[in-house]
Image (cartoon, rainbow, N blue to C red):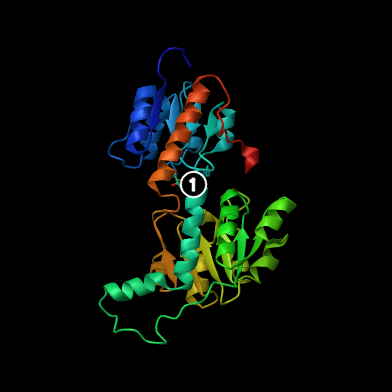
Amino acid sequence: MPQGTKPVVVVTRRLPDVIETRMMELFDARLNLEDNPMTPAELIEAVKTAEILVPTVTDRIDARVLSQAGPQLKLIASFGTGVDHIDLATARQRNITVTNTPGVLTEDTADMTMALILAVSRRLSEGERLVRAGDWKGWSPTAMLGHRIYGKRLGIVGMGRIGQALARRARGFGLSVHYHNRRRVHPDLEKELEATYWESLDQMLARMDIVSVNCPHTPATYHLLSSRRLQLLRKEAILVNTSRGEVVDEIALTKALQNGQLAGAGLDVFEHEPAINPKLMALDNVVLLPHMGSATIEGRIDMGEKVIINIKTFVDGHTPPDRVLEQMF
Ligand code: 8YV
């Protein structure tokens, strides 16, 4: 990267004002003020000119896009933690560094997961719909009965940062914490969280009251909650997903909910966002959110700050703090 000149940074979506302003000060930043998601053709145009690309989850940076990148593209500083929208292997082959923004959206996403657990168990959306429709006839001892979460078993699939933050909250709500992870966490952490480790995901699923998906989407976790595994769940169980839609077989999940094989689901993410299976929309025992797990003003600013730090460090010739390597996933 030539010294002294500001690097060309293409930002694919609108970011908080303070972040965009700082980026204008530091870089030759090309902003997307209309905030329309870029088409594949627009992304290809972007990688032909950008020295640094700042994409989000709504941009597919696949081999087709990367194969059109000019030699000036050296860094993809993604705004977000998940990197399943970026072809990491192709980026590496083309000598393009990739960074993300881990850590700063952990607490917000764990909050949203807890909110979904409560919303499904206590029928918050149904109650709200009833009131707004003007159909509430007054209090009744048997109306809108949900299920208590206190004393129930929560199975966390993926005990990374967000899984751990969820476990801490869950303890406060009187849930007992169980987890499945590629690797067992440190015994001290297990002790602190009073968490029970299950090497076998199948065995854990069959025994839980609540299952939360908190692992990243990778080739190894695609449809981890397959039709077969969903059938292992107890019919009183609920499933929440604030990670990635692709980890759960959405068609199989919809069928399981329709057939009463599963009591309910809380979903913040979907396999083909923003499209949602219309059959899911028709179900009362499902709470659906528009991928807003990390959507806080504070979180978005922190994410933007991280993007700026990653770019600055890289431009200054150092390894950026949030460099993503394929073997991390
Ligand atoms: C972000 C997310 O809003 O960071 C992630 O992986 O899923 C979201 O919480 C989004 O990805 C921003 O690109």
Identify the residue at the far bottom of this view: 141
Q: Which residue is drawn at 45% across and 73% down?
A: 122
178 with respect to 321 (left or right): right
Closest to the observer, 24 or 31: 24
In which quarter of the view is residue 149 placed? bottom right
Q: Which amino acid does label 1 sit on?
A: Leu
Task: Say if residue 113 shows up in the picture.
Answer: yes
Q: In this view, does 72 lie above or below 262?
A: above
Instruction: Provide residue 111's location: percent of width, then percent of height.
Output: 48, 56
Instruction: Provide residue 272's location: percent of width, then percent of height.
Output: 44, 54
Closest to the observer, 293 or 34: 293
Q: Is mark 1 on a helix, strand or loop?
A: loop
Instruction: Provide residue 264's location: percent of width, then percent of height.
Output: 49, 72
- How packed mark 1 is, by other alpha carbons closer than 10 Å (few <14, some 14-19, many 20 or more), is many
Q: Does the residue labelled 1 lie within 8 Å of ligand 1?
A: yes
Where's the C terminus, which quadrant?
top right
The residue tagged 1 is: 105
Closest to the observer, 168 or 289: 168
Q: Which residue is drawn at 44% across and 31% down?
A: 53
Instruction: Provide residue 8's location: percent of width, then percent of height.
Output: 40, 23
Q: Is residue 206 above or below residue 87?
A: below
